[in-house]
Amino acid sequence: MSDDSTCDTDRLDDVVLALLWANSFEEEFGGHRAWKSLPWDALDRLHARGLIGDARRRAHSVALDPAAFERGRALFEQWFAAPSRAPVPTTVKAIARTGTKATTATVHQFKITLDRVKPPVWRRIQLPSSATFWDLHCTLSDAMGWEDAHMHEFRIGGKRNGLQIGIPMEYDMPWGDAPGLADWDVPITAHLAEPGTSCVYLYDFGDGWSHKVLLEAILPAEAKAKYPRCLAGARACPPEDCGGVHGYQQICTALANPAKADEEAEELLEWLGGDYDPEAFDAGKVKFRSAARRLKELRSSMR
């Protein structure tokens, strides 16, 4: 290869490194990652030099070596005279441990409403704006009262051409056309950045629970508040594995008038036990489990 060609390749690699820094974000366990929609040959060379992780892996983002992160920052600011970015808040510190004070400047406030259920089952939650969709999944699941024992997925945009964000599936699985994006790789601000925007959250593809996730506001974090938190809500979460909306409505009808319950409803009530009250909900009793620990357990189970 000629000196000119080597020089051109080096320039391209520097440009790619600067762009990687410009779209980077801090990952859950420390370090930085960046979206990898950039020239593959440059990404491969940067990987060979030990500056970034292997871009050929299935994740939609790639890990940046600390030296690569700082060099990318310097190159970007040199060429574009951009002021140094403020440090990215750490998602783990902000929300992954119950009882940890937020270190982020703003919080996203969402209203979560279960579809096709009346009277409505809903929750109002807050979590740091630095959160990923995995963090939102964990917060939503705990606030609603789901056991997180089934698959989940966020859908952005229309059903036909929309984006799926969740736990990636293999292409050859019968129920998945594509693996989608890993929700721990996608910041919520990538798709839910303006109040009034919304998405759909699906839980338990068998029972088919669908939720509307509405971003109500982006607010300054309160100095003494602990995030995530549940501010309000109404009615208990449907029982896990009750048969979806139809089974849940049968349970509510039978509980309201046990004397008129048919055989199918009686079997549901016997399966349910006697301690379920569909009207019961107390936001102050919501407990949030560690999002970081749950992600670590998930990754271990996927190996």
Image (spheres, helix red, strand yellow):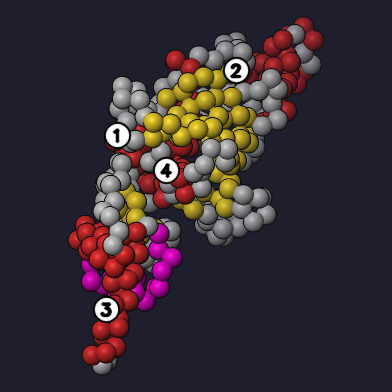
Q: Residue at label 3? A: 10
Residue at point 54%, 15% (across, down): 281
Q: Nearer the viewer, residue 6 or 196?
A: 196
- The vertical placement of 18 against 248, above or below, is below
Marks 1,4: beta carbons within 8 A: no
Q: Residue at label 1? A: 103
Q: Nearer the viewer, residue 267 or 27?
A: 27
Which percent across, then down, holds residue 239? 59, 23
Disc with the residue nearer the chain's start (4 vs 3): 3
Amino acid beneath label 4: Thr
> How many numbered discs sit on the rendered protein?
4
Badge 4 element = loop
Badge 3 element = helix
**Residue 293 in view of the camera:** no
| Rendering quarter of residue 216 | top right
Q: Is residue 232 left or right of residue 287?
A: right
| Rendering quarter of residue 33 | bottom left
Residue segment shown in magenta: 35-53
Marks 4 and 3, how far apart in space?
33 Å
Badge 1 element = loop
Frontmost of labels 4 and 3 is 3
Which percent across, then down, holds residue 295? 38, 41
